[in-house]
Amino acid sequence: MALAESKVDIPQSLQGQVFGQFDSYLKKIERTLNVTVISRDGELKIVGAGDGPQGAKQVLEDLCRIASSGRSVTQQNVDYDLSLAMEHLRGGVSEISGDVICHTISGKPVCPKTYGQKSYVEAIRNHMITFGIGPAGTGKTYLAMAMAITAFKSEDVSRIIMTRPAIEAGEKLGFLPGDLQSKVDPYLRPLYDALYQIMGPDSCAKNLEKGLIEVAPLAYMRGRTLDNAFIILDEAQNTTPAQMKMFLTRIGFGSKVIITGDLTQKDLPFEAKSGLEVAVDVLKKIDDIAFCHLTSKDVVRHPLVQKIVQAYEAYEKKHDTELRKRNRDYARSGRERRGSGQESHTGRS
């Protein structure tokens, strides 16, 4: 295949960020897209086969836009831009991350980092109820929390209510000391963590004390009507169908609801039906309810988490295929046994 060539201009002041420490980002781009990047007279020349040079140019230009906007270039930015280039898709992280939802207490902007996350955020803005379904690390809860806090601060809602089923993750915690709130707090800790990071401990504690922010187990929702609130149901894969129906019928006027869950990490008893699965089937045709399905491509934790999610997806797909094959073979052998039994009976008569 003939060699192709592209050129890109990266300002000297931004090269440190775009190339990464010890040129680690640049080396990964070269390795992944099978190209060679040569620096001559302040201009980068990219040489390689096929669409490699054009893809590398697209990645480098997008990383340059991120750096020039004052944001830090991360490994996750590089990996996601590379995945887009390898699939010959236009666009990049720079046009996604420009949609800043809010800032953390330390001043770090909270924004979508993948197209899946951007669709999720837009669905929350445009729908009364949004289901965010996807694997661990895709930002389902964190982005939902950021949207809730933004709506609360702008007085679009008067309170934030966060809830999740109080169910152990495959193990029994035994007796927990303290009052009722102390007993359920360990199950709700991830919600508190996100709340503290975005809002800050002092502001969070003040609003919790006033009752403007509420973090409670799902069982506390029965019998209530939740008006003018931003409501987040986390870990919804661990709800039963009855719990999910109970929660959805609590919603009052002026409220917005986000339901998050990962159907691959159910902690319900074996073969028990998840309320999240039932809700997807029952509600899919109702207007003003959005379903956002995030994938391993939307994982924004450490790159190793993305590889772990992909490995489990491949394993579960293979396991399901083998299980279906065994069931088909079993059904076929059963029909053959019944057929041979019928023939023997006919012969004896």
Image (cartoon, helix red, strand yellow):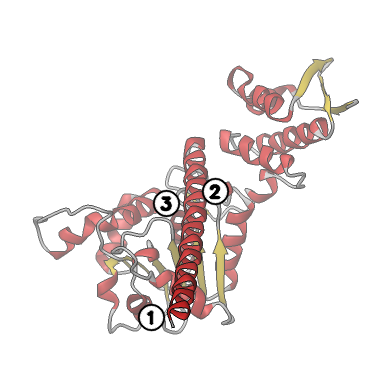
Tell me which label, 1 or 3, sits earlier in the chain: 3
Q: Nearer the viewer, mark 2 or mark 3?
A: 2
Question: Residue 290 appears at what percent x and percent y?
Answer: 56, 72
Report the front residue among 334 and 302. 334
Foreground residue, 127 or 105? Answer: 127
Nearest to the observer: residue 102 or residue 95: 95
What numbered label is drawn on residue 245? 1
Q: Which mark is residue 151?
A: none
Identify the image quadrant of residue 226: bottom left
- The amino acid beneath tag 2 is Ser
Q: Amino acid at mark 3?
A: Ile
Residue 49 drawn at (x, y percent): 83, 27
Tell me the residue at 49%/75% (across/down): 343
Evaluate if marks 2 and 1 touch, with contact meaning CB atoms under 8 Å apart: no
344 to 146, vertically: above or below: below
Residue at 18%, 54% (x, y): give it.
172
Numbered disc 2: secondary structure: helix
Name which residue type carries label 1: Lys
Viewer can see residue 102: yes
Q: Residues within 10 Å of mark 2 (few under 14, many from 20)?
A: some
Label 3 belongs to which residue? Answer: 198
Q: What quarter of the picture does the N terminus occupy? A: top right
Q: Is residue 159 visible?
A: no
* Left or right of residue 128: residue 58: right
* Distance between mark 1 and mark 3 Cα atoms: 30 Å
First in residue order: circle 2 vs circle 3: 3
Whole-angstrom CA distance, mark 2 to mark 3, is: 25 Å
Asked if the residue at tag 3 contacts the one at tag 1, i.e. Cβ–Cβ closer than 8 Å, the answer is no
Q: Are the residues tagged 2 and 3 within 8 Å (C-beta)?
A: no
Residue at the disc numbered 2: 296
Point out the frontmost of discs 1 and 3: 1
